[in-house]
């Protein structure tokens, strides 16, 4: 699947919030109450990259880089574009970057979210569990 990536801006917030809500609300509500303003309240545009096909936003990725680790904060793809290799194509370069730079690559996934299967397939393992999330990392 061919897509382009660009830096997010504040103008993207409504669309990103919609995609986030459509994808996550059902999973989140199974483990704790949905907070409809949480995504907006925590949105920092420079942490997000937008995925587009022909100028249409189809998803986004949030990556936060630190000296010794990379935090994969979120990947959201519109449902009709899921299961087409986009998530793998976004995560694979992060795995390579973390390995080259000897950094920890980790994420947090809501329990019950089927994206956990993708993460496991790519080599992530659970290193910490809570009643709502699993924290996962890549071991090199």
Image (spheres, helix red, strand yellow):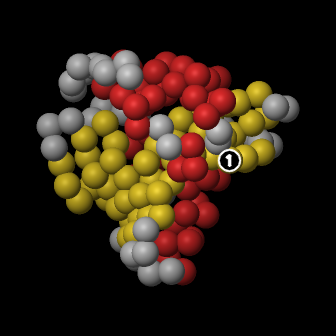
Q: Is residue 79 visible?
A: no
10 Å neighbourhood of mark 1: few (<14), some, or many (≥20)? Answer: few
123 left or right of 8 in image:
left
The residue shown at (56%, 72%) is: 97
Q: Position of residue 83 (x, y in %)?
A: 60, 35
Q: Position of residue 115 (x, y in %)?
A: 44, 39
Q: Is residue 99 visible?
A: yes
Q: Which residue is mark 1?
A: 7
Q: Position of residue 2 (x, y in %)?
A: 80, 43
116 left or right of 31 in image:
right
The residue shown at (61%, 63%) is: 93
The total number of labels drawn is 1
Q: Position of residue 75 (x, y in %)?
A: 51, 42
Location of the C terminus (image quadrant): bottom left
Quadrant in the picture for residue 69? bottom left
The residue shown at (47%, 38%) is: 43
The residue shown at (49%, 76%) is: 99
Secondary structure at numbered mark 1:
strand
């Amino acid at each position: 699947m061919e897509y382009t990536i660009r830096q997010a801006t504040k103008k993207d917030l409504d669309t990103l919030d919609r995609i986030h809500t459509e994808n996550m609300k059902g999973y989140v509500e199974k483990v704790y109450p949905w907070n409809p303003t949480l995504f907006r309240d925590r949105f920092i545009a420079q942490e997000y990259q937008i995925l587009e096909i022909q100028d249409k936003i189809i998803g986004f990725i949030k990556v936060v880089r630190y000296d010794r680790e990379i935090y994969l904060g979120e990947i959201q793809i519109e449902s009709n574009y899921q299961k087409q290799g986009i998530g793998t194509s976004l995560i694979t370069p992060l795995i390579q970057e973390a390995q080259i730079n000897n950094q920890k690559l980790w994420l947090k996934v809501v329990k019950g979210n089927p994206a956990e299967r993708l993460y496991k397939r790519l080599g992530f393992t659970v290193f910490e569990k809570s009643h709502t999330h699993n924290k996962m990392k890549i071991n090199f």
